[in-house]
Amino acid sequence: MEIVNIGRSAPTASGRAGAHVGPGQTQSGPAGNEPRIAWVDTAKGICIILVVMMHATLGVEAEMGREGFMHAAVVFSKPFRMPDFFLVSGLFLSRVIARDWRSYADKRVVHFLYFYLLWLLIQSLFRVTQVSGGTWIGFLEHLAFSLVEPYSTLWFIYILAVFSVVTKLLRRVPAPALLGFAALLQILPIETGSFLTDEFCERWVFFLAGYLFAPQVFRLAEAARGHAVVAVAAVAAWAVLNGWLTIMPVAARPGMMVTDLPVVGLLAGIAGAVAIVVIASLIAGRRPAEPLRHAGAQSISIYLTFFLPMAATRLILVRTGVIEDAGWVAAIVTAVAVVAPLVIERLVRHTRLSFLYRRPAWARLRSRASGLRLQPAE
């Protein structure tokens, strides 16, 4: 795959300037914003559901002391769950990376940090006893530490801002060297003790690949729609291989699977991310996939909020014991944790609480002349 001038021009909905967009491939965005791309939102929807499912399933299994049928899905999706999320997050970076720092920071840094800081406070208040040690000094210390090391599930929002800054700073570095360096960071067994540093090394290559290979990714999505039979066969072959690799232990390393090995993990992440792109492209625009597209369009809203309905539903089901099967409990907790944030976001969208999911004008770096619209989380 060529990496000449990759990511230096903004991709269109289909991946090349002036290309025709197939039926069902775009959806209208918020008033005044660019149209959304259906398969991109569908891919995000798949990923956010997999992320919520992982948290819900592992939490339920820890509470109930046993695994359920949902555990297999968590294991299967482990190699690509976050890599695909980061790859998709980098797809549109080329549209803004050449802007001046003020404009770029507003779009790719302040935007994410606003939601991180807001929901850091909200989540911390819900867990005040756990995070504070019972004192206000402890609570403030927790907040201060969370400015350096991202808190809980919010790390994803935090690290997107970090990725954006680092990538812009290094954008003049030749693409092959930059990608090779990022791949090396992912392959090396880097354990610094800093969660942020370790996750940066582990994940940046996928975000960078989304940015650098955006035109190729969009062309792949278009090709998949034009060659559906071949695409389905390729996805089926990938699913078999991915499933086998995730359950194949490494003899010399007890508890480690093949996908945890250096290089293999990187390749499995890329292959899985590509597979999700193909799957999303194949099903986007079809009625059964509409819930996935909607979830993807509100993916950060789900990510910010799912912790509360997840914890509440898990507590009720586990404590009451109305359902004994850990798999079904995990499935129900996952469904509630995905749907509840969507309902909450919809209820507050046009109220004074809209700031929970839409960045207000005062939290923007752009001049007042550029407009005072709220900017949604996604």
Image (cartoon, helix red, strand yellow):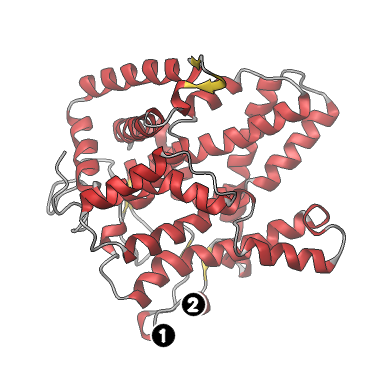
For label 1, the residue is 368
Asked where in the image residue 296 lies, by quadrant, the reply is top left
Q: Position of residue 135 (x, y in %)?
A: 86, 64
User: Tag 2's secondary structure?
Assistant: helix
For label 2, the residue is 361
Q: Are marks 1 and 2 in contact (CB under 8 Å)?
A: yes
Q: Is residue 314 visible?
A: yes
Rendered position, 143 above or below 178 = below
Residue, x 28% and y 48% (percent of image)? 179
Q: Position of residue 86 (x, y in %)?
A: 41, 46
Rendered position, 278 above or below 377 = above
Earlier in the chain: of badge 1 and badge 2, it is 2
Amino acid residing under circle 1: Arg
Farthest residue to the right: give it.
Answer: 134
Residue, x 43% and y 78% (percent of image)? 365
Q: Position of residue 239 (x, y in %)?
A: 38, 20
Depth check, front residue: 368 or 200: 200
